[in-house]
Amino acid sequence: MNRPFRPSRRRILQGAAGVAALGTVPRIAIAQSAPVKIGLILPMTGPFASTGRQISASCKLYMQQHGSTIAGRPVELIIKDDTGVAPETTKRIAQELVVQDKITVLAGFGLTPLAFAAAPVATEAKVPMIVMAAGTQVIPQRSPFIVRSGFTLPQNTAPIALWASQNKLNRVFTLVTDYAPGLDSEKTFVNRFKAAGGTIVESVRTPLKNPDYAPFLQRAKDSKADALFVFVPSGEGLAVMKQFDERGLKQAGMKMIGPGDVVDDDLLPSMGAAAAGVITSMHYSAAHDSPENKAYVAAMMKANPGMRPNFHSVGGWDGMHLIYEALKKEPKGSGEQLVEAMKGMKWTSPRGPMSIDPATRDVVQTVYLRETKMVNGEPWNIEFAKFENVGPGGNI
Ligand code: PHB
C-alpha cells in the first residue's frame, strides 16, 4: 500500500533511450535529475476505500498514458492510506511525506476533515496541495497552496434545486450526512429551493460514522413529501438506496433527488434497478458522451477489470494534469511558482471543459442534470441538460 508506484523499468529505459537518441540531454543528466514526488494521501481501507481505489487507479493510468518523466525529472507516486475519517492520521502522514520523503506535491484527500487537517502542513512546507475529492466550498481558503481538481457541493447542488422547483416537486424532505459537505449541500438546496417557491417539509442529518438510514427514511416516507433530497458521501449510496427500496418510498411516489454522490458510478452497478428514476446534478457521469470520456472509461475499465470509473477518479486524473502541466511550465518551480502556474489553467477533461479560477484556486466546470436509467440491464446516469462554467459557489 505504501510502496511508491514506479512505472516499469522498460518504460524508463525507453524514455531515456529516446532522449539520448535526440542528443539533447546526456543520459547522466536524466539519472541525476531530482524526482518529482507526488504524495497521495487517500482512504485505501475502511468505508471510503472506493475513493482511494478510484483515485489511485486514475493517477496511475495518467502516468502510464502521459509518461513517467516531466522535463527530464522522473515522477514517483507515493500512495499512503489514511484509513478514512482520522484527521490526526492524515496530518501525521502529510508531515512525514514533507519531512522524510521531501515530496514536491501533496495530493488526494478523500474527505473534508482530512483536507482541513493537512492544510496547515502545506502552508508551512510551502508545497502545493491538490484536493482531488473533498468537496466543501471553503477548503481552498484553508491554505494558499490548495488547488482543487474535483468539485464543490454548492456547484453540484444548485442545478438540482432549480430542476426540482421547475418540475412540480413542491414539498421536499432533505437528508444529508452531518458534516461540512452535507451542510454545504443542505444550505444550497434549501435556500435556492425556497427562493424558487418550494417548501421544505423537514431536514434531517445522519451521522458520518456508522449511520443507520432506516429510521430517517421511514420518517421521510411518513412525511408524504414529493421528493427526498439526499447527500451522502460516495461509499454510502448503496446503503441509502437499499433502504429507500425496501421501505417502498419509490412505490409510494417519492422521487429521490440530490447531487450525484448517492448514485456514484463505483457503486451504481450494485444498486441495480432500485436506482432507476433518481434525478441528480453532477460534474461527471461514466456515461458522459464525448470522445475523451469514451477513451477514459475504456482505459480505466481495461486497467481495472470490474471497476467503473466514478467522479472521484476524474478528480485524480485532472489533479495529475494540473501537476504535470505546472511542472512542464516550471520544471524546477517552487511551491509558490507551481500554484501560480495552475491558476487559470483550462483544459478538456473526460468530464467536459474545466478551468481553475485564479482568484479562488477552485474548479469551474460544466454541471449536468442526469436521470439514472437501466441500459442493457445496468443502471447508468444519463445526462439530459447542462449548465456551463459553474463556479465553486454554484452560480447558474
Ligand atoms: C467530502 O468529505 O468533502 C466529500 C466526500 C465524498 C463525497 C463528497 C464530499 O462524495
Image: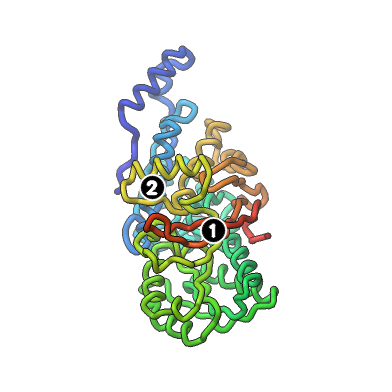
Question: Which residue lies under the disc numbered 1?
Answer: 282
Mark 2 secondary-structure assignment? helix
Relative horizontal placement of residue 119, taking residue 213 as reference (left or right): right
Q: Nearer the viewer, residue 158 or 127?
A: 158
Q: Residue at x 33, y 45 (%)?
A: 304
Residue 125 x, y percent position in the rendering: 50, 47
Q: CA gap, disc 1 to disc 2? A: 21 Å
The image quarter in which residue 263 lies: bottom left
Give whichever of 267, 4 is nearer the camera.
267
Residue beneath the point at 50% across and 52% down: 131
What crowding class fits label 2: few (fewer than 14 Cα within 10 Å), some (14-19), or many (20 or more)?
A: many
Residue kind at label 1, given as amino acid type = Met
The residue at the point 64 percent across, 61 percent down is 394
Residue 89 image offset from top left, x and y in percent: 37, 59
Q: Residue 41 at x, y = what percent?
A: 40, 51
Q: Earlier in the sequence, mark 1 or mark 2?
A: 2
